[in-house]
């Protein structure tokens, strides 16, 4: 079961990383990014909260998750600045 949970988290992270690279390259807009990744980010947060004691995260996996949340914040901050202009 732990393998399946980790695999599911890994696939969600990979998908969001792809979406983030697309929005940062200008290939998709923030609204599209939000609709594609919003539920997956919520899922990751919920899964991490519920399973923090039962799933082992190595350093690389933890780094990827942290980078994912940092880029997500950066994308939304950038979009707020554009809207407020």
Image: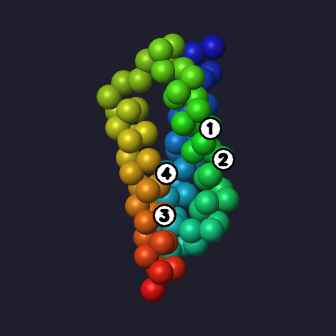
Q: Are marks 1 and 3 in contact (CB under 8 Å)?
A: no
Q: Are marks 2 and 1 in contact (CB under 8 Å)?
A: yes
Residue 14 x, y percent position in the rendering: 52, 44
For image coordinates 54% across by 36% down, the residue present is 45
54 in relation to 74, above or below: above
Residue under pointer 1: 43
Between 71 and 49, the residue placed more toward the observer is 49
Crowd tier of the residue under label 1, counting other residues whose Cα lies within 10 Å: few below 14, some 14–19, many 20 or above: some
Q: Secondary structure at mark 1?
A: helix
Q: Which mark is residue 81?
A: none
Q: Earlier in the sequence, mark 1 or mark 4?
A: 4
Q: CA distance from mark 2 to mark 3?
A: 15 Å
Q: CA distance from mark 1 to mark 4?
A: 15 Å
Q: CA distance from mark 2 to mark 1?
A: 6 Å
Q: Secondary structure at mark 3?
A: helix
Residue 62 x, y percent position in the rendering: 38, 33
Q: Earlier in the sequence, mark 2 or mark 3?
A: 2
> Quadrant location of the N terminus?
top right
Q: Classify residue 61 by image quadrant.
A: top left
Q: CA distance from mark 4 to mark 2?
A: 14 Å
Crowd tier of the residue under label 2, counting other residues whose Cα lies within 10 Å: few below 14, some 14–19, many 20 or above: few
Q: Secondary structure at mark 2?
A: helix
> Quadrant location of the C terminus?
bottom left
Residue under pointer 4: 17
For image coordinates 43% across by 76% down, the residue present is 81
Which residue is most to the bottom?
A: 85
Residue 16 x, y percent position in the rendering: 54, 50
Residue under pointer 2: 39
Frontmost of labels 1 and 4 is 1
Residue under pointer 3: 76
Frontmost of labels 4 and 2 is 2
For image coordinates 44% across by 47% down, the residue present is 69
């Amino acid at each position: 079961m732990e393998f399946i949970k980790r695999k599911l988290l890994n696939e969600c992270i990979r998908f969001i990383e792809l979406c983030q690279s697309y929005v940062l390259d200008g290939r998709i807009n923030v609204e599209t990014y939000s609709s594609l990744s919003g539920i997956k980010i919520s899922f990751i947060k919920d899964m991490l909260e519920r399973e923090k004691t039962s799933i082992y995260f190595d350093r690389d996996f933890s780094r990827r998750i942290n980078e994912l949340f940092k880029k997500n914040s950066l994308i939304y901050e950038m979009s707020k600045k554009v809207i407020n202009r």
